[in-house]
Image (spheres, rainbow, N blue to C red):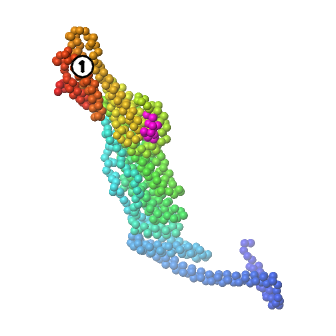
Amino acid sequence: MGGCNPMMETMEEENLIAAARLIMRVLDSNKKITSEAREILVELGARLTSMAKIAAVEDEDEEEGYGELSDIKERVNSIQEKIMAWEGDESMIWDCDPEEGKEYLKTVDEARKLAESLESLNLSKDENELLRTVNAVIQTSMARIEEEFTHMLVHNRQNFEPEHLSFRSSEDDGLDENSIVSFGDDSIDDSVQRDSVSRGSEVFIMDLVNPQVITDLRSIASLMFDANYGRECSQAFISARKDALDDCLFILEIEKLSIEDVLKMEWVSLNSRIRRWTKAMKVFVRIYLASEKFLCEQIFGQSQTEPVSSICFSESSKASMLQLLNFAEAISIGPHQPEKLLRILDMYEVLSDLMPDIEVLYSDESRSYIRTEFQDVLTRVGDCVKATFIEFENAVGSNTSNSAFPGGGNHHLTRYVMNYIKTLTDYSDSLNACLKDHEQAVNDQDSSSSPDTSPGNDNDDTENGNSSSSPMALHFRSLMSILECNLEEKSKLYKDEALGHLFMMNNINYMAEKVKNSELRNVLGDDWIRKRNWKFQQYAMSYERATWSSILNLLREDGLSNSGSSGSTLRNLLRDRLQAFYTAFEDIYKSQSGWSIPNIQLREDVRISMSLKVIQAYRTFVGRHANDISEKYIKYTADDLENYILDLFEGAPKSLHTFHRR
């Protein structure tokens, strides 16, 4: 049923011949024909002419086909001999002679074209065997070419270690006291410093592979893709370059650490690794990855319908990028210890700074995995910054002491917090970004918990334009309120009320001076400083009242005018008053010479204020009653007392026997 019947074909052909003869006889006997008959005969003639031409072409093609097939057989045999000769030599072709390598590629490309020609023909069984032979030759040569391609990539690598960065300078010197010190009762350095990690550095393209072999690598890749071996070529490249980028991380001293390893690490060691990571991250992205992207484009081009160079870059760099990102992720999910904040901010700034670079490097939407992971890690590190800062606020508020701070000077907590936030101003953009979502809650808390012991409210700063209303500023104001509340609790530990006032005076003054003389002034504002100046002055006045009110009362005239007319009674009263004054003054000297006012100018101002009040009152008292007070009862002159006042607040207690006239 499926084939034609030969008998029927023969009958049809005989009928066709008979009809043609009949037409010819009719034409011979009838010289005149109608127009309709003429049209039919013209059409018949055209059809016969076309059929004759097709038959002639088919006969010619059949003759040429047999000649071309014979030529192909000869060429296949020649190519096979050449390829097998190269296969017998185990040395790398391009290592021996790059020109021979080019000849090898030319031979293989010829085999590829022959295979395409054979596939276009309607081959017989024997001719199909020839096609299989050509394909076997191509397969053998492709394995060799892939090996040469990998060898060339590996043995022509060019590593680069940035000379302007030292990765062994300060990272491994052990304890980083500025970053890990607790703000308890241990002393700290006044200079909390951030790492100097440069921002906004330019991309630098270097040759990761010897430029002399790039042309050969590109030729190999092009041939392998033309021969439908593109997948093998891509995998060979990805494998070789993945190892190369791993070595780059080794050069930058980035270890392979699991998240569990990082979480178990002691802070001293972890701190060192974070500092190394922040420096290495920029170098890796802006030098190594940028150069890797360029290498992929050099070898695979930039205009394929399928973005081969983009795929190869993404796959070759994935493992190394994930290694770097995993470290940052481990830091972000670790404990939110306040001493880590500066280092975490360094990490956030580096990631934020590099985000545009990552978007350019991994711009292909179908290969956006690394870009997405990078953004996710940046978000998590930002959340960690916010959580760590909030934990810092909580730690300041919950810091307790069992005993009063000796001398009433600047408490370690005050020094730590002020130096800390002074350093944090260097991260203002990053902190504002991280704290943004927490802004309103802090503003509400600040308005309800801030001590209202001075005119106005700190929140006025955000309304009068004298200070920033940024998220960081709101948090800093809240932190200052928390610190002040904590200091007030600590001041209650002093048995001597005057020393508690001196303690608050010192610490509020320290806070105000730190803000006034740093970038914090632009954050907290002049109104904040003015209110703290008012506060510490109030504490200074409270100190003077608690210390000198009773002693100055001894030098007043109260009670002397009612002492009676007896001169001896008045003299005895004056003598008792002076003796009580001297005793009280000596007690103050012995105790308050050990008290401390660290700020030199503040110390001088308090001394001057005391001298003006005490010395003037003493001079007036002694002068008014000079006729009634015996010289032998005048123990100290006004100048003596003034000199003794200069011994106060030095933080070095004077013993009683050192108290003598000079």
Place of residue 232 in the rendered image (x, y in percent of width and height, measured from the top left): 49, 64
What's the residue at 32%, 39% (across, down)?
190
**Left or right: 147, with 4 as reference point:** left
Using the image, determine if residue 210 lies above or below residue 342: below
Residue 463 on the magenta span: yes
Visible residue check, residue 264: no
Using the image, determine if residue 25 lies above or below residue 326: below
Place of residue 1 in the rendered image (x, y in percent of width and height, measured from the top left): 74, 72
What's the residue at 37%, 60% (across, down)?
159
What's the residue at 34%, 42% (across, down)?
192
Residue 71 on the magenta span: no
Using the image, determine if residue 644 lies above or below residue 277: above
State the image quarter where residue 656 is shown. Answer: top left
Circle 1 residue: 621
Quadrant containing the C terminus is top left
What's the residue at 45%, 35% (across, down)?
460
Using the image, determine if residue 10 lies above or below residue 152: below
Q: Nearer the viewer, residue 590 or 232?
A: 590
Query: Hey, what amino acid is under mark 1?
Result: Phe
Q: Nearer the viewer, residue 562 or 318?
A: 562
Tell me where the magenta segment starts and ends, as one range: 458-473
